Image (tube, rainbow, N blue to C red):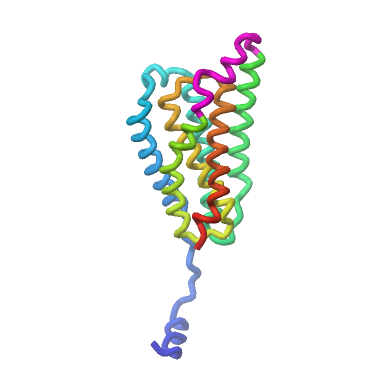
Amino acid sequence: MKTSELIALLAAADGAPVRPVSPVPALIAAGVVGAVLALAALALTLGFQPLGAAARASWFWMKALYSLATALAGLLLLGRLARPGVAPRAAAMVIGLAALAAMAMMAAHAAMRAPADAQPALWLGQTSRLCSLRILLLAIPAFAAEITVVRRFAPTRLRQAGAAAGLMAGGLSAVVYGLYCQESAAPFVAVWYSLGMAACAFIGGLTGPRLLRW
């Protein structure tokens, strides 16, 4: 095509602005795929707790809602950061911080009501040495799927985008892990679930510049 023909073609166009494609639907799909893979890995390794009884307990939903709120904060952050030159909005950070603050308050309330000899069980439970690591490992499928999606949108804030992807993956992983974990104390969740999800965000931030470079 000659230059003059290209100019004529462009001039004939109506000039209507093209709306940017939102990465959120693709990120949700990636998160679902990652969560399903994590669920399969959990079923093949650790199995599940008796879910019928767990679903009737408030602590089960406490963990699930906290983890889901963290995943939602990561999704909203990543939905912005996946696009070039777009900064995150405060709403996503407010959701994440509000969820963390609510969990911290529940943990403090439970700790203040418990006697001194019950404190170790509240904070350490039976699985403190493994909880955060398991959340981190179960987050790998979702993180890989999210990174695959984000690369298509040419992000420019690579470290922040990687951290957001890790936060979203960590939240989804914590939801899945809660189907096995029978720890019921709010202090345990506030410490070890939060550490697991924070580790996912930290590693995502470290690896983001390498994985998302384009």
Residue 192 higher or lower than 154, as above or below:
above
Q: In this view, does 158 lie to the left or right of 55?
A: right
Could you say which is closer to the camera, residue 124 or residue 7? 124
User: How many discs mark residues in the rendered view?
Assistant: 0
Could you say which is closer to the camera, residue 171 or residue 7? 171
Name the residue located 45 percent from the left edge and 37 percent from the top edge.
137
Residue 6 higher or lower than 145, as above or below:
below
- The spot of residue 173 in percent (x, y) is 45, 36
Report the magenta stretch's main SS: helix
Q: Quadrant of residue 31?
A: top left
- The spot of residue 112 in percent (x, y) is 66, 15
Could you say which is closer to the camera, residue 9 or residue 178? 178
Q: What stretch is highlighted in magenta?
A: 113-131
Assess whether residue 150 is covered by the magenta stretch: no
Name the residue located 50 percent from the left edge and 28 percent from the top edge.
131
- Residue 77 visible somewhere in the drawing: no
Q: Quadrant of the N terminus?
A: bottom left
- The spot of residue 185 in percent (x, y) is 54, 19
Name the residue located 57 percent from the left edge and 33 percent from the top edge.
195
Which residue in the rendered view is the most extreme toward the front? Answer: 129
Q: Is residue 26 left or right of residue 189?
A: left
Name the residue located 44 percent from the left edge and 87 percent from the top edge.
8
- The spot of residue 120 in percent (x, y) is 60, 15
- Residue 122 visible somewhere in the drawing: yes
